Image (tube, rainbow, N blue to C red):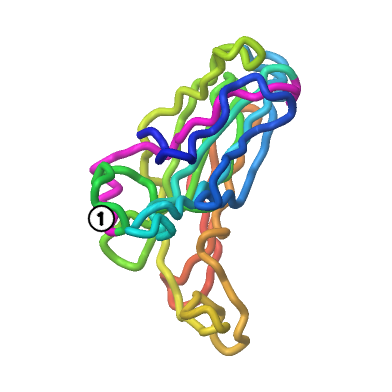
Amino acid sequence: VPPPEGLAPPYTGREHIVAEDNSAAASYDAPKVTADHFVGSPNRDNVYFTWTVFDFSCGATHDQFCESPIWGSMSTDHGFTWSTPEMISGANAGVCTMGNAFNPDLNPAACNLDGHSDLTVRPNGELAVTFISQNTPTQNPQILSLRCHPAGSSPAGTAHLNCGTPQKVADYVTGPTCDFGRGPEQCIPGVFIRAPFETSQRLTVDERTGALYNTWYDYRLGEFDVFVTR
């Protein structure tokens, strides 16, 4: 889905600039970066970058929230030039079932109410990305994952992440809320400490086998516990 007019990222070839926009309606959040360090990888030394774009260009005054998909970019020359940013969080009607009440014109299967991606590289050169998605019918979000097959050259303008369809890693069960002056936010009861679900998940790889592990904390057992899935 192309970004709204005025939010389009620049063409490739800008030295050292991963992404930029020319609109106050776009807000970037939670950037993450990793590099392919595997000796036998076909993408060795590639650098990858993901982030969330909060789009506030909806409504009659064009300043209301629209969506917050995950975007990505890559560099094949050690971070000197970067590929044209791509919206990578994608769509999957099987897991992103709520649609988007903020902008009903968007694809109802889009996984575009997201935050706080994480990323890692597998020994075969594949890029794995996980993120929190709130395209769910309840208050409980979910952790989704992407498998990407990077290819091309960032100096030549041919680099693409080639990410597939998002798949479900796990449900996230939210806990109690407190009001810190910004409305209800998830918190640790009793001690009045904010526990944001958006930042809870992390991804890593077994460098020998390529197996992926995701960890997060949630409240499914009536307390904040740490969980892991493979």
Quadrant of residue 72 within the rendered picture = top right
- Does residue 210 appear in this view? no
Q: How many marks?
A: 1
Can residue 96 be found in the magenta stretch? yes
Near-viewer residue (3 or 90): 3
Residue at (55%, 67%) from the top-left corner?
A: 196
Q: What amino acid type is highlighted by mark number 1? A: Met
Q: Residue furthest bottom?
A: 190
Vertical order, 48 against 215 (above or below): above
Quadrant of residue 158 within the rendered picture = top right
Boundaries of the magenta span: 78-101
Residue at (50%, 21%) from the top-left corner?
A: 149
Tell me where residue 95 appears, x and y as whole percent: 29, 47
Residue at (52%, 60%) from the top-left corner?
A: 198
Q: Quadrant of the N terminus?
A: top left
Tell me where residue 208 appears, x and y as whole percent: 64, 27
Q: Which residue is mark 1?
A: 98
Tell me where residue 120 appears, x and y as whole percent: 61, 35
Residue at (38%, 57%) from the top-left corner?
A: 134
Q: Crowding near pointer 1: few (<14 within 10 Å), some, many (20+)? A: some
Near-viewer residue (224 or 23): 23
Q: Residue furthest top?
A: 156
Q: Is residue 203 left or right of 142 when viewed as pictured?
A: right
Near-viewer residue (27 or 175): 27
Can residue 158 be found in the magenta stretch? no
